[in-house]
Image: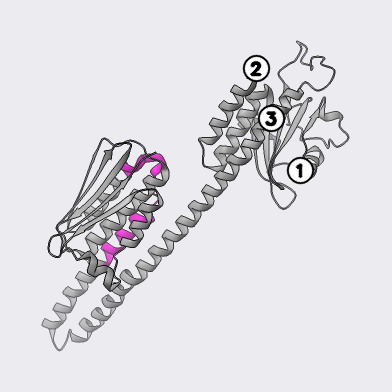
Amino acid sequence: MSQGPRSGLPAVSTAILAMSRHLEVRDVLKTIVVSARELLGAEYAALGVPDDHGGFAQFVVDGVSDEEWKAIGPLPRQHGILAAMLQEKAPQRLPDVRADPRFGGWPSAHPEMSDFIGMPIADGDENLGVLFLANKAHRGTDGQTAPTGGCAFTEEDEELLSVLAQHAAIALTNARLYERSRELTIAGERARLAHELHDAVAQKLFSLRLTAQAATALVDRDPARAKEELHQVALLAAEATDELRAAVVELRPAGLDEDGLVATLRTQIKVLDRAHAARVSFASQGMRALPAAQEEALLRVAQEALHNALRHSGAEHVDVALCRRGQGAVLRVADDGSGFDPSAVRRAGRHLGLVSMRDRANGVGGRLKVVSEPGEGTAIEMEVPGG
């Protein structure tokens, strides 16, 4: 059964804050439904997001158990009162939805509903969805709606729900933009990795094939040279394996939401330590959770800096440190490799991913510092302010 209604604007404020905590569309939809049901003291609540084919792309409910929802069957179509609300984009309050001329019935397993309120969630002219609530908690002992002279949902209920719907539209739009941005980021990362795989692994495999062919041709007439070529085959195969392992680490889901930045970095660095001849270490101190965008940027910069150190520098040791600084954090990736002249690299147009790393740092309000000299190793440091 529903809890009693939560009163006034403080309850609306609580509901709005709850919606703003989520970035996943599904989580936002569920929070909207639960908040609306609690706010108005309804027994049932649902939110339908329309598709372009006369049905609903998503339909989230509260007050109905998983077993009951499964028994009800497929998602509803846009007909009856649901279609009317999507077309008219106006609130509806009904004393008994079953008595409305537009009512088209429902599946046999559907719970009985009488008093009803519906509220569109709109962004300008676009209808993002519709909220439906039924069976106000104000009932008599016989289970019937207590006499109120009309719908048990009041004008005040409608006003509160309207405020909630306006903020729900903002939260839902933001969640959709976040998911779209994440999809574009993932697509960009995959394109970058595909390019690197083509440039690095494909070239290694091509060299491997040619060297193996050369060894085959030399087996009978020059066994000593054939042995040297086969040794080179083994080296090329090991290098190709390292390249693939490094790429696989980046292709795996980062797991930031579940594990956090520290655990994710530690796991990936352990893999790199096993896959490469260089010793790769990780240390962390005083870290706390950071905004999701900053954690992802720190992870990607660490991956890029590790990739450069392990692939280009010839380092024997690569040390990664992640420490708290004020409300933010500092990431440092240092190696004892060959180093380089950063100004000469810029002039030659070989940036070793430095442009990408700087863009990531700047994109989250951070900064990137590069310290390197020929023969003196390299240190990449990224600081973010936190949030």
**Relative to the observer, which residue lies in front, 88 or 242?**
88
**Relative to the observer, which residue lies in front, 267 or 281?**
281
| Residue 241 magenta | yes
The secondary structure that most of the magenta stretch takes on is helix
Residue found 76% across the figure and 22% down from its top: 154
| Residue at the disc numbered 1 | 86
**Residue 387 vertical placement versus 156 (above, below):** below
For label 3, the crowd category at 10 Å Cα-Cα, with few meaning under 14, some 14 to 19 and many 20 or more, is many
Q: Earlier in the sequence, mark 2 or mark 1?
A: 2
> How far is disc 3 from disc 2 in space, using C-alphas?
16 Å
- SS assignment at label 2: loop
- SS assignment at label 3: helix
Residue 224 locus on image (x, y percent): 11, 82
Q: Which of pointers 1 and 3 indicates the residue nearer the eye?
A: 3
Q: Which kind of residue does numbered mark 2 sit on?
A: Gly
Residue 157 locus on image (x, y percent): 72, 24
**Residue 247 vertical placement versus 55 (above, below):** below
| Residue at the disc numbered 3 | 161
* Quadrant location of the C terminus in the rendered image: top left
Horizontally, is 183 left or right of 351 in the view? right
For label 1, the crowd category at 10 Å Cα-Cα, with few meaning under 14, some 14 to 19 and many 20 or more, is many
| Residue at the disc numbered 2 | 4
> How far is disc 1 from disc 3 in space, using C-alphas?
17 Å
* Quadrant location of the N terminus in the rendered image: top right
Residue 92 locus on image (x, y percent): 79, 33
